[in-house]
Amino acid sequence: MLTVGVDLGGAAISVLVLDEGDERLGGATMKTPPVGGERTQVLEVMEAAVHAAVDDAGVSLADVDAVGVGTPGVVIDGTVGHASSVPGWQERFSLREGFEGRVDKPVRVVNDVTAAAVAEHRMGAGVGNDELFVVYLGTGVGGGLILGGEPYEGAFGGAGEFGHTVVEVGGAVCPCGRRGCIEAYASRRSLEMAVERAVNSGTDTVAPALVEKHGGGRLTAAILREALDLGDPLIADLLDQGVDALGAGIASAVNLLDVEVVVIGGAITDELGAPFMRRIEAAVLPSLFSVPSRVKLVQAELGDEGGALGAALVARG
Ligand SMILES: [Zn+2]
């Protein structure tokens, strides 16, 4: 059985082709149309990326049995909504129907971090553990759950919205508009917003100069690391707050669910690596209820391919 996995992100659409032996045969990555564009443009790029991935794998679309799509947002029965990072994805619509019409294959739709959790469980850092919590630290903060060996999506598709777990009542404003969410402290986007506020109020930091040096775009995870390596006090302070928020949030999730393993991935984790993992672990420990705890915190193993791999696995049904 051949399946195609599509990982739809705010910046890129990654697609790969997987055979029944979990072998990756080929793939393709294309840019996501920017916010402000049309939903049909996104579907067009997804379709083009599927064709490019199939070509790269040296197979034909006729050989593919099913397509899985991992998407940001809350997924219910093939529909998706509440995703602000992709144009046209805020209002609920049937992604399954929309994409089946384009690729003429059965399409399964899954939340992107749930897809990554499926992949880490099957072939990554979570192999052998059936109670798994996956945290992704990127533009936002995402969560995915494997409970009893199966992806857990909740009664209404909204499980795993870890980024909007409140760690400080009345705290910092989150990109979602609410206050005190983990995402308000520990996401690339919130760090970028905090740097902007600090610069506007006259705080000294190397961050704007580094952004300029890298072409004047976003405050990326790589730039965060560079600023940290240079000993920038503002970035160090903001990351301290992010680590504290993550520690409280992850410990609360472990207290609630009693998972075996917490897998931490995403661009910020990939960039900051083992020292960052150790700091998160240290921040989690004081808030764990059940001590000594046997929960393990591990770094994700599949990098930015986790989402597409998981989507291809979910496509098998
Ligand atoms: Zn929020």
Image (tube, rainbow, N blue to C red):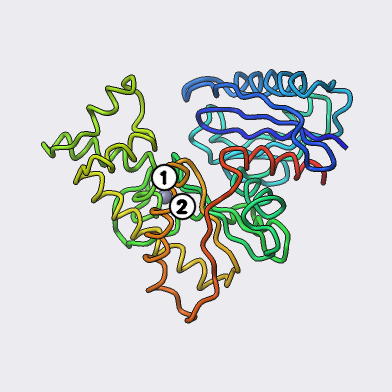
Q: Is residue 3 above or below residue 179?
A: above
Q: Hey, which quadrant is residue 121 in on the image?
A: bottom right
Q: Is residue 78 above or below residue 34?
A: below
Which residue appears at 45% of the width and 68% of the height? Answer: 251
Residue 36 x, y percent position in the rendering: 47, 22
Residue 156 x, y percent position in the rendering: 64, 55
The quarter of the rendered structure image containing the N terminus is top right
**If you read the primary sequence from the N terminus, does the residue marked by circle 2 or circle 1 appear first?**
2
Q: Hey, which quadrant is residue 170 in on the image?
A: bottom left
Which residue appears at 46% of the width and 48% of the height? Answer: 141
| Foreground pick, 163 / 134 | 134
Q: Are marks 2 and 1 in contact (CB under 8 Å)?
A: yes
Distance from mark 1 CB to nearest ligand 1 atom below 8 Å: yes
In the image: residue 161, left or right of residue 128: left
Distance from mark 2 CB to nearest ligand 1 atom below 8 Å: yes
In the image: residue 94, left or right of residue 158: right
The secondary structure type at the circle numbered 1 is loop
Q: Amino acid at mark 2?
A: Gly
Q: Which residue is mark 2?
A: 163
In the image: residue 229, left or right of residue 314: left
Q: Which residue is mark 1?
A: 176
In the image: residue 29, left or right of residue 26: left
| Foreground pick, 13 / 127 | 127
Q: Is residue 212 above or below residue 240?
A: above
| Foreground pick, 126 / 147 | 126
Residue 26 x, y percent position in the rendering: 73, 27
Q: Amino acid at mark 1?
A: Cys
Question: How far apart are the two marked residues, 2 and 1, measured between alpha carbons?
Answer: 10 Å
Q: Residues within 10 Å of mark 2 (few under 14, many from 20)?
A: many
Residue 203 x, y percent position in the rendering: 13, 39
